[in-house]
Amino acid sequence: MEKSEILKAQSPAALAEEYIVKSIWNNHFPAGSDLPAERELADIIGVTRTTLREVLQRLARDGWLNIQHGKPTRVNNVWETAGPNIIETMIKLDRSTIPMIIANVVSLRTRMGEYYIPEAIRLDATKSLGLFAELERLEDNAKAYAEFDYNLYRSFTFVAEKPIYGLILNSFKDLYHQIASLFFSDATSRQLTRHFYHQLKAACEQKNYHIAVDCMAENRQRSTVIWSEMLKNLPENLQF
């Protein structure tokens, strides 16, 4: 890849990281191949070997590379080795991935919730009810709804005694908020979701987790219709 293709990097470290990541994504350094030797790669990019070494270590932690002492640095298949922390980088590399990423994140959040939220209500309906304490003060705007939704879904993981689900939500907190803000920018979405929250609250009050099972399935179906239209008409200036 020509270094002239890199337009956004400001610091030497950022330049090196962007060059390597773009080269991997564009298959200039395909998965399973070895990177050039440090001296050669540093010369190509125009950074010091110390800077390059720091960048390689960071990319290895993120799953892009596999560094083994005494051996060439190997390029990983990020779909097998990386975590949610690279999603925003993927979006910057290829904006055509945005609909797929949004659909996957929404599906993950929804399907996990359908499992552990009824379980939380079954285990401790009183504590679950407490999670709705701020519902009546929920402001009618996208940011407020996004924050409430994230906090609600995350808090339910601990009532359900499923803390690993909470860690999964933590891993893409910022992306969750950005996607939720897009969904809740639509007034109809906020109205339907408020009704959904009240249904969940009623399930807690009645100590009946079966109500939660039914209303979550119904909410998924309604939300799917809204998302299908949103994904067809995403704003050109959508930022992540």
Image (cartoon, rainbow, N blue to C red):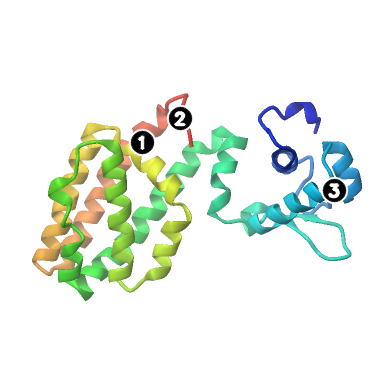
**Callout 3: 10 Å neighbours few (<14), some, many (20+)?**
some
Instruction: State left or right for residue 221 relative to residue 196.
Output: right
Which residue does the image show at 82% across and 56% down from the upper left? 73
Q: Nearer the viewer, residue 27 or 55?
A: 55
- Point out the tag, 3 or 2, that comes first from the N-terminus: 3
Disc 2 to disc 1, C-alpha distance: 9 Å
**Label 3 is placed on what type of residue?**
Arg
208 left or right, relative to 153:
left
Callout 2 crowding tier (Cα within 10 Å): few <14, some 14–19, many ≥20: few
Q: Secondary structure at mark 3?
A: helix
Identify whether 210 is placed above or below 19.
below
- Residue at 70% x, 57% y is 60
Cα–Cα span, label 3 and label 2: 36 Å
CB atoms at circles 2 and 1 under 8 Å apart?
yes
Q: Earlier in the sequence, mark 2 or mark 1?
A: 1
Q: Is disc 1 surrounded by few (<14), some (14 to 19) or many (20+) residues within 10 Å?
A: some
Tell me the tag on residue 87: none
Disc 1 element: helix
Whether label 3 touches label 2, CB < 8 Å: no
Q: Which residue is mark 1?
A: 182
The percent coordinates of residue 23 (x first, y second) are 75, 40
The residue that label 2 is drawn on is 238
